[in-house]
Amino acid sequence: MNRILFLCTGNYYRSRFAEEYFNHQADRLALSWEADSRALARDLVVTGNQGPISAFAVTELQRRAIPIRGGTRHPIVALPADFEAAHRIIAVSRREHEPMLRAHFPALLERIRYFEIGDLDVETPATAIARLTQAIDLEIAALRTRHDV
């Protein structure tokens, strides 16, 4: 099984939605890929997030009738082993996450691909999730054209 890793600041909203949406689509399309997600913030307390997953992510997943497989797990901070296990790594915002990656995982920068999906201070949840869904659909289409699906 191939693994894709989605990264964001707190592993609470964008990366969690990406993980759940990707896994649903991969199951539906019988792809040999599975997603996971992690936080780049080293201290998750400072994010102020409450609970295991953002209500915005839950609402959008439910609206799309996507079962939430990992809805009870709390955010997880990225560790080197997470990168080692991943075949593809995507941070959801270059502007926001490249500085964190440079600070904590500089040797891995060449492996990281980026979307540019803003957090709540940049984009509304509806806009961000619509753009995130589109970016993931394009990623899946690219994976399907390769021979390692």
Image (cartoon, grey):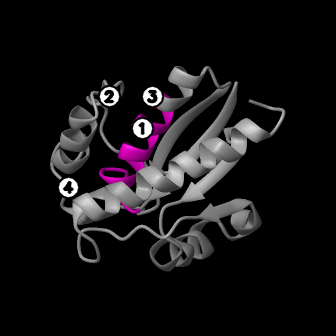
Label pair 2/3, CB-CB below 8 angstroms: yes
In space, the residues marked 4 and 2 are separated at their CA atoms by 22 Å
| Residue under the image location 41 percent in, 63 percent down | 41
Is tag 2's residue or tag 3's residue first in the polypeptide sequence? Answer: 3
Marks 2/1: CA–CA distance: 7 Å
Instruction: State the SS at label 2.
Output: loop
Q: Which mark is residue 49?
A: 4
CB under 8 Å between discs 4 and 3: no
| Picture coordinates of residue 91, whole percent (x, y) | 54, 61
What type of secondary structure mainly makes up the magenta span?
A: helix
Q: Give the range drawn in magenta.
A: 9-24
Q: Which residue lies at the image location 43% right of the left edge and 50% below the top edge? A: 133
Q: Can you identify the residue that label 3 sits on?
A: 24
Q: Does the magenta stretch include residue 23?
A: yes
Instruction: Give the label on residue 66, or none.
Output: 2
The CA distance from mark 1 to mark 3 is 5 Å
Mark toward the viewer: 4 or 2 = 2
> In which quadrant of the rendered image does the N terminus lie?
top right
Q: Are marks 2 and 1 in contact (CB under 8 Å)?
A: yes
Amino acid at pointer 1:
Tyr
What is the C-alpha distance between the residues marked 4 and 3?
Answer: 24 Å
Who's the residue at 17% across and 42% down the image?
A: 51
Q: Which of marks 2 and 1 is nearer the N terminus?
A: 1
Please report whichever mark, 1 or 4, sits nearer to the chain's N-terminal start. Answer: 1
Labelled pair 1, 3 in contact (Cβ < 8 Å): yes
Task: Point out residue 48 in the picture as x, y percentages from the top left corner.
Answer: 18, 61
- Disc 3 residue type (three-letter): His
To which residue does mark 1 refer?
Answer: 21
Residue 97 in the image: above or below residue 75: below
**Cα gap from disc 2 to disc 3, whole angstroms:** 7 Å
Q: Which corner quadrant holds the C terminus?
A: top right
